[in-house]
Image (cartoon, rainbow, N blue to C red):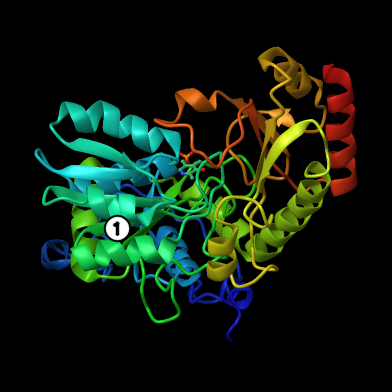
Amino acid sequence: MTELSTHLIHHPYAPPAGFVAPQVGVYKASTVIFPNVAAMRSTEWKDKSGYTYGLHGTPTSFVLEERLCTLEGGRECLLVPSGLAAIANVALALLKTGDEVLIPDNAYGPNKTLAEGELKNWGISHRYYDAMNPADLAAKISPITKLVWLEAAGSVTLEFPDLAQLARICRQRGVTSALDNTWGAGLAFAPFDLDGAGLGVDVSIHALTKYPSGGGDVLMGSIITREPALGLRLKLCHMRLGLGVGANDVEAVLRALPSLVLRYAAHDRATRALVQWASQRPEFAQVLHPALADSPGHAHWKQLCGSETGSAAGLFSVIFHERFDGSHVDAFCDALRLFKLGYSWGGPMSLVVPYELASMRQVWPDHLAAGTLVRFSVGLESAADLQSDLQQALAAMV
Ligand SMILES: *Cc1c(COP(=O)(O)O)cnc(C)c1O
């Protein structure tokens, strides 16, 4: 077996004797019974050699953790109640008073909000760097920098950074790097091997809420590492914070994983069709999607994700021409019928969000046109129907 799609279906789950069903059972527990006091004292939760308490794992959660390590190429996995909880777990495990965290200015917004809120209150400082300028990251790393966040593509604006170069800088400077790998989903590129020679990030977090769940009905996150000492630091923090996940939700993700490769490819295909169409429309000053030749960081995307036919997920954004003001853009969004107004992505239903980008960035990057930005998450509907929907909403907005 070599292909990931096969690995995601054939997993090492051992069903109960005499009941060889392929799907993993939903094992629910807080209490786990020990046969005697000696077993109770000696069972170790940290290395998964046994079961101690529902919060520290069940046969159901152990299988999902193993599958996600296969998906992302890691060795250890922690499950947490949301993608944001994964970000918080990493920050709380690795930072203390006096430390600094560096975050890309185009990072997932709530990562920045956590730094500006609790982390700041606890005496942990943060600085934002320009992910499209590795020299800016290198210049901002100082002796107090203890964690660098990476993200590809950038949140909302979808710039694609030179991820390998950013990871290399962190490695050279001895700073732990953590990647928000939600967009890549473990499919677009290998977070622990960015250059084909084993250069990787130290930590990969993933909002399983998006593509792995695939249904828009589960909130969950994962934290994946390769290095045992780092994995243990994250695990101890996870244990102290009591970040458990429900077995029914774990099972929902396990059910969806076998179709992940197909769904991701379908989202990608429909998105490219819409992006081609959108880039011809006069209403848009700019279309942002890493596979478009003039989208910021296209060359980095092409290099990391393999080729022009490499994966590019199911998100794209447009910046409306400046002649359209905010109320036109709101009217466009309100006129959409198939694209629903709502946060998140990765499910079957297409979604749209207008953003006040100026309030989300420290600086308006040179590579972005002026105007109002709208982000689309392309679902699994027919691409032709989605295009008609966009077309009728453009006609309706003026
Ligand atoms: C959605 C998202 C998250 C957070 O996931 P939740 O499960 O909604 O908390 C983190 N990072 C990225 C890039 C996301 O898109």
In the image, residue 364 sits, relative to residue 149, either above or below, namely: above
The residue located at (69%, 35%) in the rendering is: 351
Of all residues, the one furthest to the front in this rendering is 366
Which part of the image, by quadrant, shows the N terminus?
Answer: bottom right
Q: Is residue 33 visible?
A: no
Q: Is residue 43 visible?
A: yes
Give residue 168's quadrant in the image.
bottom left
Query: Is 237 positioned to the left or the right of 262 in the image?
Result: left
Give residue 235's quadrant in the image.
bottom left
* Local SS, label 1: strand
The residue located at (76%, 58%) in the rendering is: 269
Q: Nearer the viewer, residue 298 or 220?
A: 298
Q: Nearer the viewer, residue 100 or 281?
A: 281
Residue at the disc numbered 1: 177
Query: Is 379 positioned to the left or the right of 99 in the image?
Result: right
Q: Nearer the viewer, residue 273 or 48?
A: 273
Spot occupied by residue 312 in the image (x, y as percentages of width and height): 64, 58
Q: Nearer the viewer, residue 123 or 243?
A: 123
Q: Amino acid at mark 1?
A: Ser
